[in-house]
Image (spheres, rainbow, N blue to C red):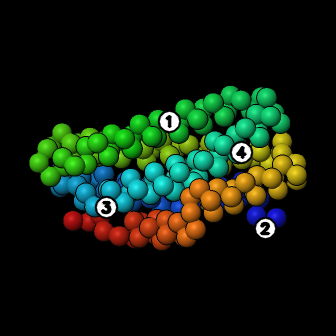
Amino acid sequence: MSESPTLTLRHEHELVLMVVEAMEHEVAAIERDDRVDAGRVADMVDFTRTFTDGCHHAKEERVLFPALEQRGPAAAGAVSVMLAEHDAGREAVRAIDGALPRVETDAAARRTVAEHLGLYAQLLRLHINKENNVLFPLADRLLGDADMQRLAAEFERIEEEETGAGVHERYHALAHALRDGPAER
């Protein structure tokens, strides 16, 4: 096994945090200029839906969380909180995506995008902190080598078969581009 599953998820968190930083900059720009860079925000929504939710959360929800609950029933509470936060994030992204087509002509839509981008970014910062500092150390204690090998293999399968070949790399590049791209207007 080249990398532990929890280390893989931590590395993915670093990419997600790049996009969170871009979201925070976009919120500041919207609040300052009352203008939304719709293409940039659409890229953030795409990253969130495809990489954060479609790949990263899929690994957690379908592989890691069930393994934790099986090995340590006491982990059920922590897993329940993580799942609720995933759902709250999805709601925020739906609100952003729903308002995005109207941002050019509708001040309320611009406020909705800014509010939900900010909420989502704050939620993710707190969520990632909990996973990195509570849930993943718990997983490292509860799951044995065989469990970790099974999780790593399933993570690879999700990336290759469900997310798709090359998609992971494309979203790595997008995270960097969003972080490094313009939010100054």
Q: Earlier in the sequence, mark 4 or mark 2?
A: 2
Q: What residue sits right under mark 1 in the picture?
A: 87
Q: Residues within 10 Å of mark 1 (few under 14, many from 20)?
A: few
Q: Does residue 98 appear to the left or right of 35 in the view shown?
A: right
Question: CA separation, marks 3 and 4?
Answer: 32 Å
Q: What residue sits right under mark 4 in the picture?
A: 64
Query: Which residue corresponds to the image point at 33% horizontal and 56% vertical from the top-left?
Result: 42
Q: Residues within 10 Å of mark 4 (few under 14, many from 20)?
A: many
Q: Residues within 10 Å of mark 2 (few under 14, many from 20)?
A: few
Q: Quadrant of residue 119?
A: top left
Q: Does residue 4 appear to the left or right of 110 in the view shown?
A: right
Across and down, in percent, residue 8 comes to: 68, 59
Helix or strand or loop: what does disc 1 sit on? helix
Q: What residue sits right under mark 3 in the picture?
A: 40
Q: What residue sits right under mark 2 in the picture?
A: 2
Query: Which residue corresponds to the image point at 60% horizontal and 37% vertical from the top-left?
Result: 82
Q: Are marks 2 and 3 in contact (CB under 8 Å)?
A: no
Q: Nearer the viewer, residue 139 or 45?
A: 45
Q: Amino acid at mark 2?
A: Ser
Query: Which residue corresponds to the image point at 37% horizontal and 41% vertical from the top-left?
Result: 94
Q: Quadrant of residue 157?
A: bottom right
Question: CA separation, marks 1 and 4?
Answer: 17 Å
Question: CA separation, marks 1 and 2?
Answer: 31 Å
Q: Earlier in the sequence, mark 1 or mark 2?
A: 2
Q: Amino acid at mark 3?
A: Arg
Helix or strand or loop: what does disc 2 sit on? loop
Q: Amino acid at mark 1?
A: Asp
Across and down, in percent, residue 27 comes to: 31, 51
Q: Earlier in the sequence, mark 2 or mark 3?
A: 2
Helix or strand or loop: what does disc 3 sit on? helix
Q: Is residue 71 above or below residue 33?
A: above
